[in-house]
Amino acid sequence: MEQQEYAVGATRVAAGGPDGRRGAAGRGTADAALAVHRAGFLPAAAPSGADAAPGAAAEGRADGPQAAGPDLSPDPGLLRLAHWFAAAGPGTADDLCTASFGLYPARHLGAPAEPADPGVSWWHGPTAHGATVARARRARATGALRRARRDEAALPVVRSGAKPGRPGRHRKPERVRLLPGTAAEAQDRSTAGLPDGALAGGALAGGAAVGGAAAGAGLPAAETTVGELPAVELPDAERRIAARLLLAHPLVTASGPHADGFPLIRRHRDWLTERFDTLLGYRLVVGPRHARLYKSGLGPGAARRLEHPATGAPFTPAGYAQLSLALALLVDAPERLRYGRLLDAMRTAAPGLTAEPADLAMALAALAAWQVLGDLPADPADTDVVLTVDRELARAVPAGPPALAADAADLVRRAAEAEPATAVRRLLAETPAVLAADLPEDQRTWLLEHRLSGPAALAEFLGLEAELRAEGVALLDPAAELTDLALPGADTLAHATLLLVERLVEEVRPLPGEATDGDVPIPDALIDGVLGDITDEYGLPTHYLADRTALRRDALDLLHRLGLITPTPRTTWLLRPPAARYAPAPDLHPVPGTGRHCRPAPAPAREEQRA
């Protein structure tokens, strides 16, 4: 399997030897340093002797013998990366973090639907609705609605604004929408701007749905108990647990929160190294005290981001810049470092990178969560606290050398480069669903030619189940553990988001036989109306009741990160086919003339009276 030059640079420099103990953070450091000097990024030489700072002697006592000498020297590649982060927008900064660090977790949908022919569309195929939310559904009368309507028993709460069987008071009256082929066909949404060339239904037809091995379909990541498994299945179970753990947490330490899985990784490191390299082109480095899976980037618009380990607040571009700047100094820092010295060195190395205290706190919290830094001072103003620095882990964080890229966009592109087979398998292993219409021609061709064997290999390796549909493939995790986002989830936002996507699908799902390019536009007024109904019908936290804009923002953000909706250049949204997994199954064969969008046929008695 060919290795991209981007990853090879990380092998030789970022990790150093096979145990990850030696080396700096970027390949071609001399060239990068020259470029950074010319750009004015590197500071002037540090003062020495009589010109040294007055606190140098005291600092030497705090930091030990290694503290004596010149000030901390930043790694040129990471310093350059810090400036790219500072100049980037929020979305670009997220993509740049994914490309340069590769510490994102895998993200998969759960709750598999009933098996179906691979040529069936997600819009009209079996759904996971019954598995996601248990509901008492009323019997549907003969001549039911073409689209299954939502149930009134979604939650055990009292409705406050909406009348049973009618749209909520926040909803605008619907325009009549007739079946395709009728003379007066009218639709409430436009198909303008939809992508051309999407695969027609049945593009992935042929063969049965693929599933992972029965023994591994529901295995958790690191918490699985394998002591009761038969001896012949024990190695396979351990390998699958270790592989899932690394895909969910690319940096695992012997003393961290996932330490229980570290012995499994060390025990099966040769097998894991070969499988990750063969299937995904990922490099695995296992040392005495940590294991690092060097993931590649996912390209622009991957919707992955770092978050504050404690609060969950998303990183800002300034927070990413402070993270990269701190790493630039820590890769060669002494093992004991005074907190005030680190802050002074950061200001000296990049005087133009100003940041709010919250951005600095966010960066240091991430480094502490990765165990690059020890305990942080309880009071940020206490600069005399001595930090413990793990240089080995600091050098393991960067996934590739920024020196090879011309700018941020070039780095994001380089990090995602791979041959078609590897690129598609990476998307299958890391993202909720892979739609053929989203892929370049060479990758789409590979997916169509290997629609069974490609997902099957990953499903077996990671204990997942493959769901094949006309639009693409999704690898599902029935255990709902190999993901950083859950839908349905336990919190209020996840529950409200589930109700939102369910009702959006019911409102705009294409009718059978209706032409569609895959994604379906969502009217802005429909989003606001549905959220208004949800707010009226179900109890929500006070901050969402007081600020419905926040509810809209957070719910749409969750759906976007799960790949169930996608934005358009006109600041509107498109509903994606996999979203239909969360809605009740549609009634595809209603009694003619009785569907909600059909004109009722004249009754025979009325015809006789008119005659």
Image: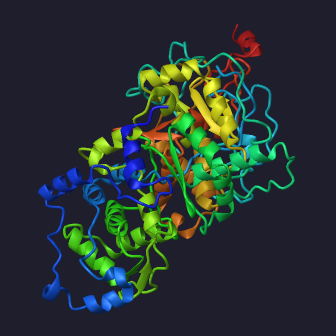
Quadrant where the C terminus sits is top right
Residue 187, horizontal then vertical, whole percent: 49, 26
Q: Nearer the viewer, residue 150 or 290?
A: 290
Q: Is residue 468 visible?
A: yes
**Residue 346 horizontal/vertical position (percent):** 27, 72
Apparent side of residue 108 relative to residue 323 in the rendered image (left or right) = right
- Do we see residue 382 in this rendering? no
474 relative to 411 in the view: left or right: right
Say if 228 sits above or below 8 in the image.
below
> Relative to the observer, which residue lies in front, 288 or 574?
288
Closer-to-camera residue (500/435): 435
Residue 334 locus on image (x, y percent): 38, 75
Q: Quadrant of residue 260?
A: bottom right
Tell me: residue 214, above or below residue 261.
above
Q: Count the marks: how many?
A: 0
Of residues 532 and 73, the one drawn nearer to the viewer in this rendering? 73
Which residue is located at x 60 percent, y 55 percent? 494
Please say if 144 is above or below 449: below
Snapshot quadrant of residue 257:
bottom right
Horizontal and vertical percent position of residue 418: 43, 33
